Structures are given as structure tokens and as C-alpha cells.
């Protein structure tokens, strides 16, 4: 895919860095929902790896939350087209966050992708049961992440 998303790292609503390009970051008050992807992770290395993958997705605004609490609030405020969650969060249980987002915050058709570290079939089933759309069993496999997230972005573009 071509294009370059703008990147804004937010922690509890406080801006940590400015967008990488000159385009302003879209906000829900501006009307129609754009292709905003929210990534929730408590690990700086995982956020860096995911951000490098995101540069390959066309016309995406990427928001990064440093933990489940900040991510939950950002999902409410920004209404993203997709949420990607690290399976291990420092402040919340990821399965509970998935269930909460699915029940209270996200539209039923909003994809929620979980990135696992050493995923087991049991853990995968638990996340899918909680409301995840997809489960990537190896957070360090950028090809699998690109394939899964890219496919779901293409599907969501038609909605």
C-alpha cells in the first residue's frame, strides 16, 4: 500500500508528539469518520514496531495509547475505524478491555485486533469470545500484522 499516515502519540489525551506530516489530525467533531487506527500498548518496543508497520498502510491516521486506560478513553473520544490491542497491558487486562470496547464503545462492525506474544489456542478463543475480530499470535511477525490489519482496513473502507 502507498501513502503515509500521520502519527500522533497520545497518553491520556495529552499530546506527546506532533503529526509527522503537515496534515492536521482529524477529530470526531469534524464529522465523517476517517481511517483512524488506534493502537493500545504499554510497551515502548511494541509501539515502535507497530508504528514502523503502519507507515505501509495508505491514508491512515494512527493514534497510539500508552496503556489500556488511555486507550479506552481515546476509543470513546476518537471513534476509530479499527483498534489494535497488545495482549499484555500494564494497567488493564486486555481481554476485559476488548469486551468493554465491544460492549460499550465501538460500533459492532469496528474491527478489534489483538497482538499476542506467545499466543495459545485457548488465549485466542478467549479473545475472540470477548469480542476481538482477529488475533495475531506473534506480535513480532510484521508480515502477519500487515496482512491482518491491511485486510481489515480494506474491508472497513467499504462500510
Image (spheres, rainbow, N blue to C red):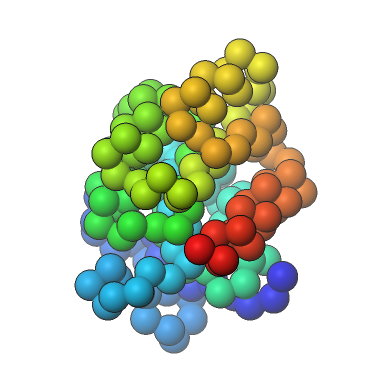
> Where the N terminus falls, by quadrant?
bottom right
In front of the other: 16 or 95: 95
**Frontmost residue, 23 versus 113:** 113
Residue under the image location 50 percent in, 34 percent down:
132
Res 77 → quadrant:
bottom left
State left or right for residue 147 relative to residue 59.
right
Residue at 69% over, 39% down:
140
Instruction: Please state the horizontal and vertical placement of residue 67, each as a whole percent of the image.
Output: 36, 39
Q: Does 47 appear above or below 4? A: above
Question: Relative to residue 110, is residue 123 drawn left or right?
Answer: right
Residue 39 is at least partly visible in this image: no
Q: Is residue 158 above or below residue 50?
A: below
**Residue in the picture at 40% in, 58% down:** 80
Residue at the image position 29 percent from the left and 44 percent from the top: 105
Q: Position of residue 76 (x, y in %)?
A: 26, 51
Relative image position of residue 125 (x, y in whole percent): 58, 20
Amino acid at each position: 500500500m502507498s501513502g503515509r499516515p500521520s502519527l500522533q502519540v497520545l497518553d491520556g489525551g495529552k499530546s506527546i508528539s506532533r503529526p509527522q506530516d503537515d496534515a492536521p489530525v482529524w477529530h470526531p467533531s469534524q464529522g465523517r469518520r476517517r481511517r483512524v487506527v488506534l493502537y493500545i500498548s504499554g510497551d515502548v518496543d511494541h509501539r515502535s514496531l507497530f508504528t514502523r508497520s503502519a507507515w505501509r498502510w495508505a491514508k491512515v491516521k494512527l493514534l497510539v495509547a500508552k496503556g489500556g486506560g488511555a486507550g479506552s478513553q481515546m476509543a470513546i473520544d476518537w471513534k476509530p475505524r479499527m483498534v489494535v490491542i497488545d495482549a499484555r497491558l500494564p494497567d488493564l487486562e486486555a481481554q476485559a478491555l476488548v469486551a468493554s470496547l465491544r460492549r460499550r464503545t465501538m460500533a459492532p462492525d469496528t474491527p478489534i485486533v489483538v497482538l499476542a506474544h506467545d499466543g495459545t489456542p485457548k488465549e485466542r478463543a478467549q479473545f475472540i469470545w470477548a469480542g476481538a475480530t482477529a488475533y495475531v499470535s506473534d506480535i513480532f511477525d510484521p508480515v502477519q500484522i500487515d496482512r491482518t490489519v491491511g485486510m481489515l482496513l480494506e474491508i472497513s473502507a467499504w462500510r
